[in-house]
Amino acid sequence: MGRTPCCDKSGLKKGPWTPEEDQKLIDYIQKHGHGSWRTLPKNAGLARCGKSCRLRWTNYLRPDIKRGRFSFEEEETIIQLHSILGNKWSAIAARLPGRTDNEIKNYWNSHIKKRLIRMGIDPVTHTSLLNASLCNPTLLNLCGLLGLHPLIKTELMRISTNILASQSQSPSLVNQSIQGQQYLPHDAQAQQHLELFQNQQLQNQTLLNAPFPDGGQFQEAADTNLWHDIVISDTHLMNVTGVDNNNLEASIPGLVSDSFCISGNNSQNYNLASILSTPASSSDNMISSPPSTYMNSNTEDERDSSCSDIYDFQIPDLLDVSDYM
DNA sequence: AAAGATTCCAACCGCAAGATT
DNA sequence: GAATCTTGCGGTTGGAATCTT
């Protein structure tokens, strides 16, 4: 298919836009609409290519653009949508009014991605980076090195054993499920997950407002079944975002029943699918006490520290485990 | 205070796909 | 049906701002 340059490059300005150029573009579009982007620069008296004008308008000058920091809810939405849609920034932006795909992409790359990595979550698959270690006998010693709670260690071992057993019994099922859920989702699946996600959003609102179960300290929580919920969510071997429990169980009965079995009574108060899909946010919701502390946090640091508390507990700073990731 | 390192984000680039000729 | 045009998308980059030493 033939393709010519979007414009005659000679004599056209590149680089940052001046306020005068912005004003010309705004004035023209307000009067005439953008029409054909190719002819717009000439008509508007701009020495830019149409592509540059379109980008400037859609990413910066459009009146309905919301500027400023991303709210917690927006960030939560981005993470969840990304787990469903992948790097479909325009699709994600379509569900975040006032935000552009470029802005979301930048925010993902500069903030969310790094935070997820720091918290031990693979930003591509939305699964724990420890997954790989569970399949590696050498790395299984990591639990010991980290001084994890003995019960947690036991459960981690049990889950990994279940996974391996499931894989040997029905590898195709497991592979199919992992390929389908963890990596680039099929369009149909993505759509299905999206619909489920939208329903889930409503439930999440309830979850966000739910108080910490017993109002106690984190260490207390670590000794309850709630801790198991958190650990399982972080060490879950598949991305189950937006997948209802029945579907998941149909794929890997052993794993799911085990995981859910050890969730304990407290889990009944939560939307487990949501928790599993976004460990970061789930830990926020449950560990932050009171929840409003986090919700009102505006600075990156506050948000970051709040998000990473639980992971700091699991992986002491003095131990550099980045080599294992 | 200065130099170097890092972060952040606006803008650019190339590609793909749909529309038009 | 082929060639060309137009638009939109995702990945990448350059440089200003900020942080660290």
Image (cartoon, coloured by chain):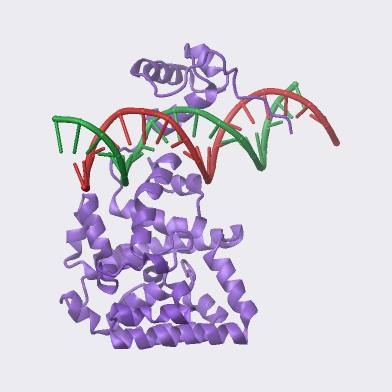
Chain colours: A purple, B green, C red
Residue name at image x 49 percent, y 44 percent: A90
Image spot of residue A180 (x, y percent): 58, 67
Q: Identify the image quadrant of the N terminus of chain A.
A: top right
Relative to residue A50, is residue A175 depicted above or below?
Answer: below
Indicate left or right for A173 with C4 as reference: left
Q: Identify the image quadrant of the C terminus of chain A.
A: bottom left
Residue name at image x 48 percent, y 24 percent: A53
Query: Residue A166, located in which quarter of the rendered image?
Result: bottom right
Residue in front for this viewpoint, A53 or A66: A53
Residue name at image x 34 percent, y 77 percent: A231
Query: Residue A290, located in which quarter of the rendered image?
Result: bottom left
Image spot of residue A241 (x, y percent): 46, 66
Indicate left or right for C2 with A134 as reference: right
Residue in front for this viewpoint, C3 or A58: C3
Image spot of residue C21 (x, y percent): 21, 47
Relative to residue A285, is residue A245 depicted above or below?
Answer: below
Residue in front for this viewpoint, A320 or A134: A320
Indicate left or right for A273 with A223 as reference: right
Note whether residue A268 is visible: no
Indicate left or right for A107 with A172 as reference: left
Image spot of residue A237 (x, y percent): 47, 74
Residue name at image x 17 percent, y 68 percent: A289
Note whether residue A121 is visible: yes
Relative to residue A145, is residue A65 depicted above or below?
Answer: above
Residue in front for this viewpoint, B9 or A68: B9
